[in-house]
Image (spheres, rainbow, N blue to C red):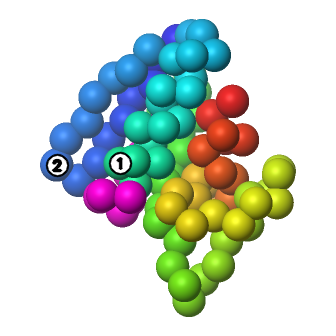
């Protein structure tokens, strides 16, 4: 399986088949969100929108309940927001 990451001025594909590869994808998504703000990642048939939470709009992961400071992931049509670790596990 692969992860297709797209952002404002580009994109790339990363392998996503092993736990190590999934960790690399998670780390890269968080780092990219820190620098570019919004991006998208498609893993399998799921398209995740990644946004940087703001101080005006605090966000908590729907699964692990951690406060999200750098990257908040959600799918279109869903109000549930997840951290990179829970969304891309």
How far from the left and from the top, in percent, is residue 88?
Answer: 63, 34
Return the residue nearer the eye: 17 or 49: 17
Residue 18 in magenta stretch: no
Q: Earlier in the sequence, mark 2 or mark 1?
A: 2
Above or below for 84 versus 44: below
Q: Residue at x 56, y 23 (%)?
A: 22
Q: Does the rendering let one see residue 80?
A: no
Q: Quadrant of the C terminus?
A: top right
Q: Which residue is label 2 attached to?
A: 9
Q: Which residue is label 1 attached to?
A: 32
Mark 2 vs mark 1: give the one in front.
1
Above or below for 11 versus 2: below
Q: Which residues are magenta?
A: 34-41
Residue 40 in magenta stretch: yes
* Spatial separation of the CA atoms under disc 2 and disc 1: 12 Å
Q: Is 24 on the left-hand or right-hand side of 72?
A: left
Return the residue nearer the eye: 19 or 80: 19
How far from the left and from the top, in percent, is residue 44?
Answer: 56, 22
Task: Tell which residue pokes out farthest to the bottom in this image.
Answer: 56
Q: Residue at x 56, y 27 (%)?
A: 23
Q: Residues within 10 Å of mark 2 (few under 14, many from 20)?
A: few
């Amino acid at each position: 399986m692969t992860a297709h990451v797209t952002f404002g001025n580009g994109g790339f594909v990363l392998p996503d088949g092993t736990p190590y590869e999934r960790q690399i994808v998670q780390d890269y998504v968080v780092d990219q969100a820190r620098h570019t703000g919004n991006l998208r990642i498609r893993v399998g048939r799921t398209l995740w929108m990644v946004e940087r939470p703001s101080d005006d709009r605090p966000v908590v992961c729907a699964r692990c309940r951690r406060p999200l400071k750098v990257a908040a992931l959600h799918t279109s049509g869903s109000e549930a927001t997840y951290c990179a670790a829970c969304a891309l596990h």
